[in-house]
Structures are given as C-alpha cells and as structure tokens.
C-alpha cells in the first residue's frame, strides 16, 4: 500500500455523462497538475494503467482504489468502463481478447494500433472535451445528438486516436495539449469536417443509440427485445450480409436501390474493423431488423434468397425471435410425417379402396416420396404390437 492510499485527491471532478474511464482519469491527472503516468502509478501503487485497455479490463480493485482517491461511489466509476455494457451491448463479460460489440484498440506500447477509439468532432468541440463510452461500441457509426458520422482517425495524419499520448508532448510538465488533439500531429480533432448522416444511416444510429440507452429495442409493432439479444441478432444479420454466397444477393439488392453503400470486400472480425468497413454492413443490417419480421422476409425474397443453409444459422445461442423466422422462412427442411400420420393415411387409403404404396401415401401427404421412411414405417406397422409391461 502506498503512503498516499486513501488520501483524497485535491481536485476530483466527476465523470461527465457517458464519459469513458481513461478520459476521466486523464482529466483527473490534469486537474491535479500531474503527468498521467506518474499520477496513475502513485494512485495505483506503481501498477500500470496506460499499457493496457483499462476501459475494457480494469479490475474491481483498480476501480475501487481510484474511486476512493477521487471520493466517488464505486458504482459510478464502474459505469465508466465497458464492463458497464454487460447485458446491454453483450450478454456477459469474458476474459478473452475481444469483448463482443466492443471495438478493439490494439494497444501496443501505450499506443492504439487499431481504429477502435471513435469520436464525434462536434462533441469534442464542447467544453470540456472528453471521450464517450458509446464511441467504443462496434454497432455505433454516428452521433445521435449531432446527426453526423463518427470518425475513427486523425483526418490529417490518418493515425488511430490515442488521446493518452497527448501528455507525451512535454517530458516534464503535464501537456498543454488537450484531449481533443491528435497525439501524433497535434491536429485539433474537433475541427474535423462534419459528415452529415443520410436518412438511412440516421435511422440506424437512432435505433442503436436508443438500444444502448434504454436496454431494449422496439423491432416492430409491440415487439420489444432486450438490447443484448438485439445486438446478438444484429451481429448475425451483419455476417449473413457479409457472407460470400448469400450476402452477394443481398448486397446486390442494396446496390440497385442505392439505400446504402454496401461494399464487396469481406468483413473480418467486427470488433477489429475500421468505421468505414463496419458501417456499410451495420447500418443496412439495422434496417433489415426493423419492422420485424416483414422487412427481412420481403427483402430476402426480393433479393432472390429462398433458403439459407443450416450451417449459416445453426447457432445454439441465436435469439429466439431471429432463429424462428430464419428457420421457418429460409431453411426448407423436407417435411417428415410422423408414424401416427402415416398410419392414419394408410387406414384412409384402405377405407377408400386405394392401394397402399409409397406414391399414394406421399400424394395424400403432399410431400415428395421418401422411400426409406415408407419402408421403415411399413416394417414398424407389420410388427405385432408390444404388450404393455
Ligand atoms: Zn456529437
Ligand atoms: Zn494527426
């Protein structure tokens, strides 16, 4: 334990609405006029804070230490982490390298190598500038408040956003470079030209943002689903849209109608993709999941998709509302009559004096002839009934 443990920091601003842990800790250090690395080392008894993606993996012990020193309730500080999205964006937090729905930043020597930290130029222009938690969600592509696209890199030098490195500008004193600057070329990110959302992208941003804020989604008339189930379903639709064979027909459908710019390149792991690569699949998928289930059925039909193979949708954990529609509408499994149905059709044929054979039984049932099933049922029917034990 450090001799400073438990002592309240002289200046301890509250986290701002939807503020990300690292953004708040950065501001906390600056408010106390300290370099961020020495500040967290002192606070956390030499444990490293900036070398890993603490917004995703900070332990309760680390959070509790910071909360005590800043004089804040533990639950408020935990809410600043991406763990706070448990049962909202994803079902349960896992210790794996990727949390579903949460963008990976690819931390390497305290610098982000991936484009997993997004921002809205207009939000960053507000005072004080700070980073929002929602800017790390893979399904989010725009700012609901400003109705513009988010950005995932510096428009000047194209580097990923790594705001913690803004403090590296001066070796001794806390940096004068505020958090809204590019750590690499010092460009003011709040000056990035704003790209307005079109109606379709605005719809997707609205649905996803409300899902995160409310914890549920209204996908059709009186059809409410929990947000983490919605995002699980959305992820599935995204992968169907991006798949090589079946997605091709869907992508062609969208291209012909000019709703969305759906690209042809395959999509890798969603959480590791750039904003541009994600948004062309995420936003049309949100649209497909609206007006449930009529829009999806209609679009698949218009795109010429009559069936989907089981390997595409056979996922044990698929939300029921999606599983049911995909299986009923797009997995045309041959209908298999039960033994009881077979017996009653056989009795019916005998009664009306028509020969009992495979073709006649199939004809009455309205199915293609299934010889092996016919033989199996005939064999079973010819066996003497078993005495009840
Ligand atoms: Zn904004
Ligand atoms: Zn830059």
Image (spheres, rainbow, N blue to C red):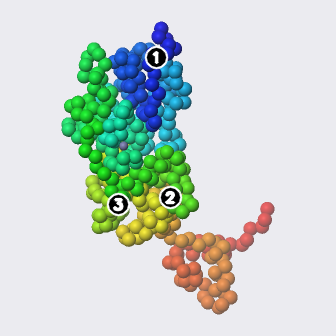
Which residue reaches farthest top? 3
Quarter of the rendering containing residue 355: bottom right
Q: Nearer the viewer, residue 305 or 34?
A: 34
Q: Which residue is mark 2?
A: 219
Is 67 rendered above or below residue 251?
above
Quarter of the rendering containing residue 31: top left
Q: Residue at x 29, y 16 (%)?
A: 173
Question: Mark 3 or mark 2: which is in front?
Answer: 2
- Indicate the secondary structure of the residue bearing disc 3: helix
Q: Is residue 353 left or right of residue 55?
A: right
* Distance of label 2 from label 1 (alpha carbons): 46 Å
Q: Which residue is mark 1?
A: 9
Chain-order first, disc 3 or disc 1: 1
Is disc 3's CB within 8 Å of ligand 1? no
Q: Are marks 2 and 1 in contact (CB under 8 Å)?
A: no
Query: Where is residue 42 shown, x and y percent of the image?
Result: 41, 14
């Amino acid at each position: 334990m450090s001799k400073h443990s438990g002592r309240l920091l002289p200046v301890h601003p509250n986290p701002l609405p939807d503020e990300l842990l690292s953004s708040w800790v950065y501001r906390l250090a600056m408010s106390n006029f300290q370099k961020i690395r020495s500040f967290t080392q002192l606070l956390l008894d030499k444990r490293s804070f900036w070398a890993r993606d603490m917004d995703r993996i900070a332990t309760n012990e680390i959070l509790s230490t910071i909360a005590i020193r800043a004089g804040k309730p533990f639950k408020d500080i935990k809410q600043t982490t991406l763990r706070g999205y448990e049962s909202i964006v994803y079902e349960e937090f896992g210790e794996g390298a990727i949390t579903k729905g949460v963008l990976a930043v690819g931390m390497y020597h305290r610098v982000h190598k991936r484009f997993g930290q997004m921002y809205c130029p207009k939000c960053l222009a507000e005072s004080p500038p700070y980073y929002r938690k929602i800017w790390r969600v893979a399904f989010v592509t725009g700012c609901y408040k400003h109705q513009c696209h988010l950005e995932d890199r510096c428009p000047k030098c194209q580097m990923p956003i790594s705001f913690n490195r803004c403090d590296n500008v001066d070796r001794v004193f806390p940096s004068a470079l505020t958090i809204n600057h590019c750590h690499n070329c010092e460009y003011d990110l709040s000056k990035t030209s704003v790209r307005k959302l079109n109606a379709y992208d605005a719809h997707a941003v609205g649905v996803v943002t409300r899902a995160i804020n409310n914890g549920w989604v209204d996908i059709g008339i009186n059809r409410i689903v929990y947000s983490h189930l919605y995002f699980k379903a959305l992820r599935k639709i995204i992968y169907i849209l991006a798949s090589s064979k079946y997605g091709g027909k869907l992508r062609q459908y969208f291209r012909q109608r000019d709703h969305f710019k759906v690209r042809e390149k395959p999509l890798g792991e969603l959480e590791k993709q750039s904003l541009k690569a994600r948004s062309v699949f995420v936003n049309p998928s949100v649209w497909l999941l609206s007006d449930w289930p009529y829009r999806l059925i209609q679009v698949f039909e218009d795109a010429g998709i009559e069936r989907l193979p089981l390997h595409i949708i056979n996922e044990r954990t698929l939300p029921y509302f999606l599983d049911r529609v995909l299986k009923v509408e797009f997995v045309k499994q041959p209908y298999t009559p039960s033994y009881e149905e077979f017996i009653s059709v056989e009795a019916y044929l005998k009664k009306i004096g028509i020969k009992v054979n495979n073709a006649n039984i199939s004809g009455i049932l309205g199915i293609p002839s299934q010889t092996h099933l016919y033989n199996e049922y005939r064999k079973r029917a010819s066996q003497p009934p078993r005495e009840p034990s």
